[in-house]
Image (cartoon, grey):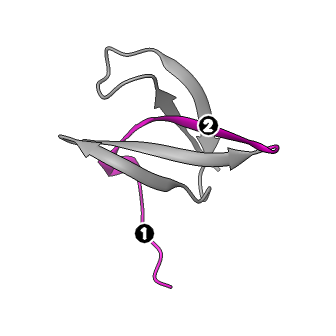
Amino acid sequence: MSASNIRSGPGENNPGIFTIPEGKIVSIISESGNWNNIKIESENKSLMGWIENSALGSINA
């Protein structure tokens, strides 16, 4: 299983602020170029950050 770095802003120059494991479901808040601002629920708190589009997959409901 791999993990993705979540960054403080859209772009590789922004520092990583946390990681999420492969398969974690996230909500997309907004987009900026090839980056998505995401939100996840973790241990009764919300975390937000940026991830590259290529690191996201999709699920069909």
- Image height check: is 47 above or below 58? above
Q: Which contiguous range is marked in magenta? A: 43-61
Q: Is residue 46 left or right of residue 32?
A: right
Q: Residue at x 60, y 33 (%)?
A: 19
- Relative to 14, residue 42 above or below: below
The secondary structure type at the circle numbered 2 is strand
Query: Is residue 15 shown in magenta?
Result: no
Q: Give residue 60's position: percent from left, percent from top.
A: 46, 82
Residue 58 numbered tag: 1
**Residue 9 appears in which quarter of the rendering?**
top left
Three-letter amino acid code of the residue under disc 1:
Ser
Q: Is residue 26 above or below residue 32?
A: below
Q: Horizontal and vertical percent for residue 8?
A: 45, 22
Near mark 1 (Cα within 10 A), the count class, few <14, some 14-19 or many ≥20, is few
**Secondary structure of residue under mark 1:** loop
Q: CA distance from mark 2 to mark 1?
A: 20 Å
Residue 57 placed where, x, y %? 42, 62
Along the horizontal axis of the image, is 13 left or right of 39?
left
Residue 3 numbered mark, or none: none
Asked if the residue under mark 1 is in contact with the one under mark 2, i.e. CB atoms within 8 Å, the reply is no
Disc 2: CA contacts within 10 A as few (<14), some (14-19) or many (>=20): some
User: Residue tagged by mark 2?
Assistant: 47
What amino acid type should be assigned to the residue bearing mark 2? Leu
Q: Is residue 28 above or below residue 61?
A: above
Chain-order first, disc 2 or disc 1: 2
Q: Furthest residue to the right?
A: 43
- Residue that appears at 62% across and 37% down: 47
**Splitting the image into 4 quarters, where does residue 25 fall?**
bottom right
